[in-house]
Amino acid sequence: MSPFFSKRRVSFVSGALLCASLVSACSMREPAQSAARAELRPQATATTGSVAPKDSDAALHALPPPPPSTPDAAPERKMKARDALAAAPAPEYEADEFASAGAPVEALAAAEPQMRRAPPAKAAASGALALGGAVAPAAPALMQPMEKSKKELADDKGISEGGNTFEVNKPNAFTETAKDNLSTFAADVDTASYSMARRYLQQGQLPPTHAVRVEEFVNYFKYRYTPPEEGAFTVHLEGAPSPFNARRQFVRVGVQGKVVSRSQRKPAHLVFLVDTSGSMASSDKLPLAIESIKVAVKNLNENDTVALVTYAGSTRDVLPPTPATDVKKIHAALDTLVAGGGTAMGSGMEAAYKHAVKKAAAGVVSRVVVLTDGDANIGPNLSPKAMLASVQKYVSEGVTLTTVGFGMGNYHDSLMEQLADKGNGNSFYVDSMKEARKVFETQLTGTLEVIAKDVKFQVEFNPKAVSRYRLMGYENRDIADKDFRDDKVDAGEIGAGHTVTALYEVELTGEAPRELATVRIRAKAPNGTEAKEQAFPLTRANLKPSMDAASSDFRFAVSVAATADILRTAPAAEGWSLGTAQKLAEGAVGGDSDRTEFVRLIGQARALMSASASGR
């Protein structure tokens, strides 16, 4: 046999032995972990989804997954397999390997397998790895190549469910007005939670309770509030009896931002920061992100500019600031992107901000737009706090941030949401090309022109009229009452044409004072440092005698908030019916396609809850 074929034979046999050992390692599971998985698995669940590859995980991901009944591999055996892979050369990706990835971008509902939902009380805590619905301690090397410091772990308040990580927020409880009659929170126009929950439901699975944020459900939809004739926004107050509890009322605070036409908007400089790590390879991640940017570019003005930075194991300047009108050049740069490598997200953030700050000025909108699954696993800055600390000087100079999430299986919702909040921006989640058009044609272009910043709400309830109240959602946007008039305290931003809606559930005292509450809004001009305050009385005249007498926008918002509270099992919503919420929404659709879709989603949630309750 010739030396050439002899070498090939040795290489082939070695590779086969390595694959055999990995299959053996991955197919071994501890009986105790298998029992734990059986205890945690709900009765009506979907098949566990696989996590997309990252770094050396790509080789493991390529192996056939073990059947559901196969016990978990012991942690030490997994470590040996990982060490063997670490010594092997990293796979190289060619552009044509992913050339077909963008083709099925319209049909993304089945792009990722479904994940099991573990009960919240038994979900994996930070620093643990979810294995097929069960929870097992994770060795640091399995989580990421670079171990987080103790301080970064302390900053990480996320909880892992089905491989995706969410921030834990306890639903607001009722507050006795006599003890505390002030409710203070920051504006929020994020929508990521709703589109993420929609994807779960469309895949035949209830969303994890921690994935549901009421305010992001409510603010996903358009409401027909009258825009201001002058000033930054108008306020719309309304209330009506609850269809879920005869002793309670719902009260809505609605804000409509002024509309700024595309031709009137300030010039914008957008730095698109794209995650091109290995975990972004699936069709619902990098290919969809690329198409999303193309949608955004199509809707920019002739005076706008675009830059493109990518990050994987390292950062790369792909496109210098380029006029948005040079579509051919921008598309050519985007079409070169392929996925592979680790995720140095913190380093990428700093590089993108350095680009953006060069254009920051009073007459220019300078914004970083991050497109990622949020999985940061290498580099010096891994936690949201560490990432923001490294770029805080650029934030203070006026650079804003938009985070756009993609994919499931290792999606870090908690990181994306926290970054957007601290970066004076917004957080979205894109699960389809339809959602990409909604976000990048309408919502992103709206947030580019900030009409009011550090917007704070404070509702002062009259103890003589209201005995108890609770704010539905906004738990992670809570502000101390004493900080309402402290203009150094950060709050939320409102973009041109945006609406902000907040709902309260209240119990009246039975007395009849005219004024129920005073709603105060405090905000700064886009480039201002001192805030101005406005006050609006909520009176009995704002309360309708019945829910049927309330506006369709009010009824629909109540339905959405109630559905979110039921899905996240809020204690105050115990005993509420999704059937009632669905009926309420059906009467308030008004031909809107997003509202029609929501009604269908409630039906899917009802079926899943019914199946779970019956043990199917």
Image (spheres, helix red, strand yellow):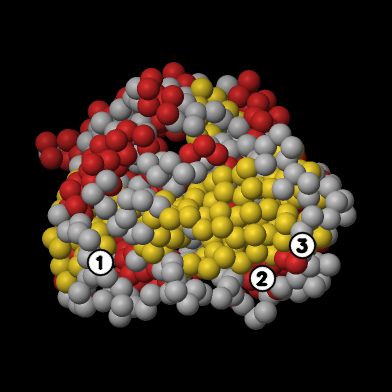
Q: Which residue is drawn at 27% across and 46% down?
A: 396
**Residue 241 image offset from top left, x and y in percent:** 81, 60
**Residue 490 image offset from top left, x and y in percent:** 41, 44
- Picture quarter containing residue 584? bottom right
Label 3 sits on a secondary structure element that is: helix
Numbered tag placed on residue 268 in the rendering? 1
For the residues carrying marks 3 and 2, which lies nearer the camera in this image? 3
- Picture quarter containing residue 493? bottom left
Q: Residue at x 17, y 35 (%)?
A: 7
Q: Residue at x 65, y 64 (%)?
A: 237
Taking the image as shown, residue 142 lies to the left or right of residue 317, namely: right
Whether residues under marks 2 and 1 lie with C-beta atoms below 8 angstroms apart, the answer is no
Residue at the spot of label 2? 553
Q: How many angstroms separate mark 2 from mark 1 (CA)?
A: 33 Å
Whether residues under marks 3 and 2 lie with C-beta atoms below 8 angstroms apart, the answer is no
**Residue type at numbered disc 2:** Asp
- Picture quarter containing residue 14? top left
**Residue type at numbered disc 3:** Arg
**Residue 343 image offset from top left, x and y in percent:** 30, 41
